[in-house]
Image: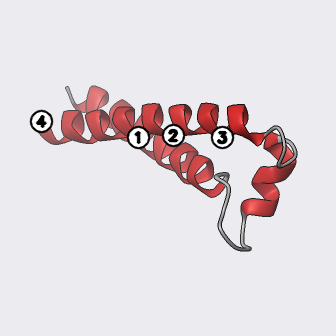
Amino acid sequence: MHILKIVLEIIVVIASILLTLLILMHKGKGGGFSAFAEGLTGSAESSGVAERNLNRWTVLVALLWVALIVAVDLL
């Protein structure tokens, strides 16, 4: 049980970093890290599909992150 909790905590850390990166990659309304995201997702004309996919991945990772936090707490 102790090893499982450690493994889940490590996965939570990885999911946290991934979630942070996904959020920073979203298209911003101003400056900031949006320039980095634009370089990865393409130009402004073709960013519709890329932005939707980025939104889906962000929501998926966020749900996984919440589930992992609950699982760690229950252990």
**Image quadrant occupied by the N terminus:** top left
- In this image, 23 relative to 2: left or right? right
Q: Secondary structure at mark 3?
A: helix
Q: Secondary structure at mark 1?
A: helix
Q: Which label was assigned to residue 58?
A: 2
Q: Which label was assigned to residue 45?
A: none
Q: Secondary structure at mark 2?
A: helix
- In this image, 48 relative to 74: left or right? right
Marks 2 and 1, Cα distance to the nearest angstrom? 6 Å
Labels 1 and 3 touching (C-beta < 8 A): no
Q: Which label was assigned to residue 51?
A: 3
Residue 19 position, x and y percent, is 52, 46
Residue 17 position, x and y percent, is 55, 49
Q: Is residue 15 above or below residue 25?
A: above
Task: Characterize the local packing of mark 3: few (<14), some (14-19) or many (20 or more) Cα atoms within 10 angstroms.
Answer: some
Labels 2 and 4 touching (C-beta < 8 A): no
Q: Earlier in the sequence, mark 4 or mark 3?
A: 3
Marks 1 and 4, Cα distance to the nearest angstrom? 18 Å
Marks 2 and 3, Cα distance to the nearest angstrom? 10 Å
**Image quadrant occupied by the C terminus:** top left
Mark nearer the viewer, 2 or 3: 3
Q: Earlier in the sequence, mark 2 or mark 4?
A: 2
Q: Is residue 72 above or below residue 33?
A: above
Disc 1 target residue: 62
Marks 2 and 4, Cα distance to the nearest angstrom? 24 Å
Task: Characterize the local packing of mark 4: few (<14), some (14-19) or many (20 or more) Cα atoms within 10 angstroms.
Answer: few
Disc 4 target residue: 74
